[in-house]
Image (tube, rainbow, N blue to C red):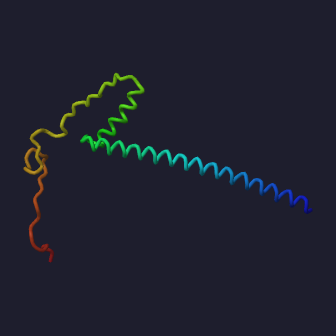
Amino acid sequence: EPDVVVRRQEALAAARLRMQEELNAQAERYKQKQRQLEEEKRRQKIAMWESMQEGKSYKGNLKLNQQEVESGASASSVVPKSKPTKKPLRGGGYNPLSGEGGGTCSWRPGRRGPSAGG
């Protein structure tokens, strides 16, 4: 039946058109997101360059600027965390190069020359 075939082809074309429009919209959203990311990177590079010109440590300054932005939005009562004191893993007299203060095993190099198998 030709009219059924024509209607089916028209529906198929309409579905393809709809899917193509969806794909175009997704591509546009992706491009917009990429532009925003590139703009953010550009701003960070400019900030790094300016801090370098001022003679500051640009990497540390960049981190400080990000923390200032975050802490500016929240309260300024930020308490720095103190690191817990760590005890050493071995005693103070341990020196692997001297051979003293270690365990019971000691390493000595093997004898020189060809192996004595024969």
User: Which residue reaches farthest right?
Assistant: 1
- In the depicted view, which residue is nearer to us: 105 or 82? 82
Residue at x 11%, y 39% (from the top left corner): 92
Q: Quadrant of residue 3?
A: bottom right
Q: Taking 111 as reference, is 35 left or right?
A: right
- The reply, left or right, for residue 38 in relation to residue 54 is right
Instruction: Say above or below: 116 vs 15.
Output: below
Residue lying furthest bottom in this view?
118
Rendering quarter of residue 82:
top left
Residue found at x 12% / y 73%: 116
Q: Is residue 5 above or below residue 79?
A: below
How many numbered tags mark residues here? 0
Screen quadrant of the N terminus: bottom right
In which quadrant will I find the C terminus?
Answer: bottom left
Residue 100 or residue 92, whichever sits in front: 92
Where does residue 77 sit, x and y in percent of width and height? 34, 22
Residue in the picture at 11% in, 62% down: 109
Q: Which is nearer the eye, 111 or 33?
A: 33
- Residue 2: percent from left, percent from top: 91, 62
Residue 112 on image: x %, y %: 9, 69
> Which residue occupies 53% across, 46% down?
33
Where's residue 56, x and y in %?
25, 40
Is 3 drawn above or below residue 86 in the view shown?
below
Relative side of 15 to 38, left or right: right
